[in-house]
Every structure is written in structure tokens, then in C-alpha cells.
């Protein structure tokens, strides 16, 4: 039987296998040849379903985005609570895969179905009193915040960071920056993520109120 006709080899099967392989070898170790070996086929067989490696990476990114959940607020849920829930779920999903944030940040194209679900979310914010452009900027800012935060979380830790900073700062070990790092921990934590999330959502409420929506607070 020809490799391209191998039973069970589909685009979805490839994406799921690629995500499993990603957790083992990371983005830098993920190659089409390695994925083909994982699936027990020759590399050309994969190109019947996905034309380029970038298309594979886009499919992996979309799978993570969808796994985080997309859609309008739940009945009775405020837009603030919805955006916070959405951001937390997105972060958990990115963290569930090695280099998850790098995969999503490098995505070039999403499917029409996912783009339409995103439009539904924008429509839900408009129904809450958002102008369309503010709805777009709000979700974009939250997504970029989560991506950037997780990129830092998934980066290799620099255990000597504080020692090196102490050498660079005029105040040495007593510098305010080092005091803040000691108080908060040298790596991102839940309270740091929640602080940024609250700042973004509260700031959005202020902007929305300034544009004349009395229910923003």
C-alpha cells in the first residue's frame, strides 16, 4: 500500500502526533522527518495532508487556541469575568505544551472556522457596549500579554540573574530592582500574571467608561 494511502493518516492525526512530539523534543527538535518516523511513514506521505512545516505549525497553534476555549460569555457572566477566564484558560493551554507560546506566536494563518469564532467573541463585546475597534484591541492585547508572559515562563531560567544585576547596578545588592525581585521571586508566578491581567481589564473598563458606556464599571 502506498504511504499516502496509509489508513488513519489524516491532518488531525498528524497535528496530535506533532503536539506529543513537541512535548518530547521542543520546537527546535521538531522536524517533518522526525514526525514521519513517529507516525511510521516516509516524509513525503505527510505532504499529502500538510504542504509545509509552517502549515503544520499553524495547525498545532490552532489546536492549542481552540483547546483553550473560544466563544461568547456564559449566561450572566460579565465581560470582565469572561476575559479573565479566557486569558487564564489560554495560559494553561500554552503551558501544557513545551514551547507552546513560541508555536502560537509564530503562527502565520488560522482557519476560517477559527477566525469566525474570534469574530463571535468580538460581537459579544460589542453587545456589551464596546466599539468594534476597542473590542479588537482588548482581545488582541490580552492575547499578546498571555503569549509574552508564557514565553518568559517557558524560557530557560537564568539562575545567576540577580548576581549579575548586582554587579551592574550602582546600589549593588541593595538596589530597588533586586529588592523587588527578591520579594516577588525570580521567575513569573501566579500573582504576577494576575496583576497584569487585572491591570489590563481594569484599564479597559476605564477606557470604555470614558467613551460613554455607563455600565462599564
Image (tube, rainbow, N blue to C red):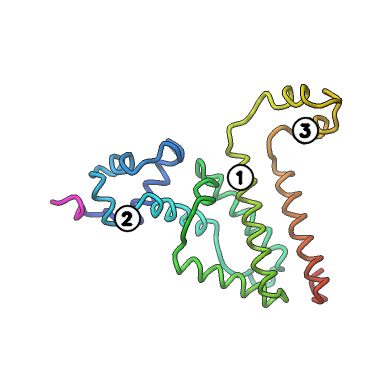
Disc count in the image? 3
Disc on res. 196:
none
Q: In which quarter of the view is residue 143 placed?
A: bottom right
Q: In which quarter of the view is residue 83 placed?
A: bottom right
Q: Is residue 87 above or below residue 191?
A: below
How far is mark 1 from mark 2, CA to CA? Answer: 29 Å
Magenta span of residues: 1-6
Q: Is residue 173 above or below residue 46?
A: above
Q: Earlier in the sequence, mark 2 or mark 3?
A: 2
Left or right for 46, reference 128: left
| Residue shown at 23% from the left, 44% from the top | 42
Which residue in the structure is indicated by mark 1?
150
**Where is residue 131 shown, x and y percent of the image?**
70, 75
Which residue in the structure is indicated by mark 3?
181
Front residue of 151 and 54: 54
How far is mark 2 from mark 3, CA to CA? Answer: 46 Å
Q: In which quarter of the view is residue 173 placed?
A: top right
Which residue in the structure is indicated by mark 2?
51
Q: Earlier in the sequence, mark 1 or mark 2?
A: 2
Q: Is residue 187 above or below residue 93?
A: above
| Residue shown at 64% from the left, 69% from the top | 73
Q: Is residue 101 above or below residue 204?
A: above
Front residue of 151 and 6: 151
In terms of secondary structure, where does tag 1 sit?
helix
Left or right for 141, reference 112: right
Q: Earlier in the sequence, mark 1 or mark 3?
A: 1
Amino acid at each position: 500500500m502506498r504511504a499516502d494511502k496509509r489508513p488513519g493518516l489524516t491532518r488531525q492525526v498528524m497535528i496530535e502526533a506533532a503536539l506529543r512530539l513537541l512535548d518530547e523534543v521542543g520546537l527546535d527538535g521538531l522536524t517533518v522527518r522526525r514526525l514521519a518516523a513517529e507516525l511510521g511513514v516516509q516524509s513525503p506521505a505527510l505532504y499529502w495532508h500538510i504542504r509545509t512545516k509552517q502549515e503544520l505549525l499553524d495547525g498545532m497553534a490552532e489546536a492549542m487556541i481552540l483547546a483553550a476555549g473560544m466563544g461568547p460569555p456564559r449566561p450572566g457572566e460579565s465581560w470582565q469575568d469572561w476575559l479573565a477566564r479566557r486569558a487564564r484558560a489560554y495560559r494553561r493551554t500554552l503551558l501544557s505544551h513545551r514551547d507552546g507560546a513560541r508555536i502560537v506566536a509564530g503562527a502565520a494563518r488560522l482557519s476560517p472556522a477559527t477566525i469566525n469564532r474570534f469574530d463571535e467573541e468580538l460581537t459579544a463585546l460589542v453587545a456589551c457596549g464596546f466599539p468594534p475597534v476597542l473590542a479588537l484591541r482588548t482581545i488582541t492585547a490580552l492575547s499578546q500579554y498571555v503569549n509574552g508572559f508564557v514565553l518568559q515562563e517557558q524560557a530557560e531560567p537564568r539562575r545567576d540573574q540577580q548576581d549579575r544585576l548586582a554587579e551592574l547596578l550602582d546600589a549593588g545588592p541593595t538596589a530597588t530592582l533586586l529588592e523587588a525581585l527578591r520579594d516577588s521571586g525570580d521567575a513569573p508566578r501566579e500573582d504576577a500574571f494576575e496583576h497584569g491581567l487585572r491591570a489590563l481589564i481594569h484599564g479597559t473598563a476605564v477606557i470604555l467608561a470614558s467613551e460613554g458606556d455607563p455600565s462599564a464599571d
